[in-house]
Image (spheres, rainbow, N blue to C red):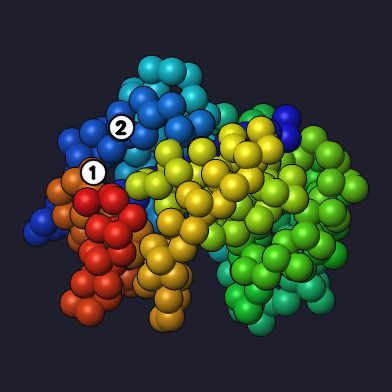
């Protein structure tokens, strides 16, 4: 399996007024992403798509829309996310019925839980989920500092006990932490793909041959650049890849700026700036961006050539 390519985590456009899913706008976004030669697949219902705010019915409808626009047979992977395992299983079963190729599993936000001290909770959660579906899983690893981040020891314990993982999404911010986890994963099963999420980390990891692709909300608007970095590094054209990497750094810095909690609202705003969706409305608990944040993003989007 290993090589996966660029997986975009689409935003979910909402209508003004009642904030219902804007199916017309989502259909257009799905068509744009899935027709792009730079996108190898999509992951709807993820954090970038405000999946936690979507009802079960809305989640299924989003998958149906992406499936309807998948003219080139690309990967469609649904993110599943709930503290209640019963809800998680229903989300995963719905994804399988909708024809998804896999599900990406978020950590359960259990009160007072430390994944490092008590990995058995994560092992049991993923094992029980895997028994209820026949499609493979992607392990979603949150960044360091998040209370539900899996350290390499917990990642290893999950992968050893639950056999049907196709990939791990590593959102670690530290290159050292990423490399340690990468080596741990590949030692267990070299066929499991390891995917970073930050466009700023893709180039150094691709140079080190430690990125089997990338799974990112940035795929909504910089998929061509991410695809080029991967293909150029694979061909040994590191100087060309570095030029693209350096051109993306101002945008990456603006997206990842503190407060980090606004990351997904920033993804949505930049997607809106490109004209891919009609507005940047978010559902609570997300909040609208400040005008200062918007001006900064607009400036770097112009600098990068997105608008």
Task: Quadrant for the N terminus, please.
Answer: top right
Mark before the other along the chain sequence, 1 or 2: 2
- Which residue is under mark 1? 276
Asked if the residue at tag 2 contacts the one at tag 1, i.e. Cβ–Cβ closer than 8 Å, the answer is yes
Residue 119: quadrant of the picture: bottom right
Disc 1 versus disc 2: distance between alpha carbons?
8 Å
Q: Residue at x 75, y 50 (%)?
A: 208
Q: Residue at x 84, y 39 (%)?
A: 190
- Which residue is under mark 2? 32
Q: Residue at x 85, y 65 (%)?
A: 153
Left or right: where 16 falls relative to 43: left
Left or right: where 305 falls relative to 193: left
Q: Is mark 1 on a helix, strand or loop?
A: loop
Q: Nearer the viewer, residue 282 or 74?
A: 74
Q: Is residue 166 visible?
A: no
Residue 254: quadrant of the picture: bottom left
Question: Dot 2, crowdedness within 10 Å: few (<14), some or many (≥20)?
Answer: some
Q: Which of 55 and 14 is in front in this view?
A: 14
Residue 103: where, in percent of width, then height? 58, 41
* Residue sitting farthest toward the left: 17
Left or right: where 187 falls relative to 38: right
* Residue sitting farthest toward the right: 187
């Amino acid at each position: 399996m290993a090589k996966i390519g660029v997986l975009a985590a689409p935003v979910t456009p909402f209508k003004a007024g009642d904030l219902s899913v804007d199916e017309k706008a989502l259909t257009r976004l799905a068509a744009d992403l899935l027709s792009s030669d730079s996108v190898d697949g999509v992951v709807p219902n993820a954090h970038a798509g405000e999946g936690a705010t979507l009802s079960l019915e809305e989640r299924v409808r989003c998958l149906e829309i992406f499936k309807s626009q998948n003219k080139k047979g690309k990967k469609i992977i649904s993110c599943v996310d709930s503290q209640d395992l019963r809800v998680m299983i229903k989300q995963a079963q719905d994804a399988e019925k909708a024809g998804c190729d896999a599900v990406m599993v978020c950590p359960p936000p259990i009160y007072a839980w430390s994944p490092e001290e008590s990995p058995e909770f994560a092992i049991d959660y993923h094992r029980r989920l895997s028994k209820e579906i026949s499609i493979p899983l992607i392990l979603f690893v949150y960044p360091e500092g998040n209370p539900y981040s899996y350290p390499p020891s917990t990642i290893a314990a999950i992968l050893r006990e639950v056999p049907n993982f196709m990939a791990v999404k590593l959102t670690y911010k530290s290159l050292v932490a990423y490399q340690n986890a990468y080596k741990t994963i590949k030692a267990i099963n070299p066929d499991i793909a390891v995917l970073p999420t930050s466009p700023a980390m893709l180039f150094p990891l691709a140079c080190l041959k430690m990125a089997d692709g990338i799974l990112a909300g940035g795929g909504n608007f910089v998929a061509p650049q991410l695809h080029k970095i991967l293909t150029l590094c694979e061909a040994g054209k590191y100087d060309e890849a570095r030029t693209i990497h350096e051109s993306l750094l101002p945008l990456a810095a603006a997206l990842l700026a503190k407060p980090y909690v606004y990351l997904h609202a920033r993804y949505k705003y930049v997607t809106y700036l490109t004209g891919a969706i009609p507005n940047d409305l978010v559902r609570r608990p997300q909040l609208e961006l400040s005008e200062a944040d918007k001006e900064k993003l607009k400036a770097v989007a112009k600098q990068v050539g997105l608008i």
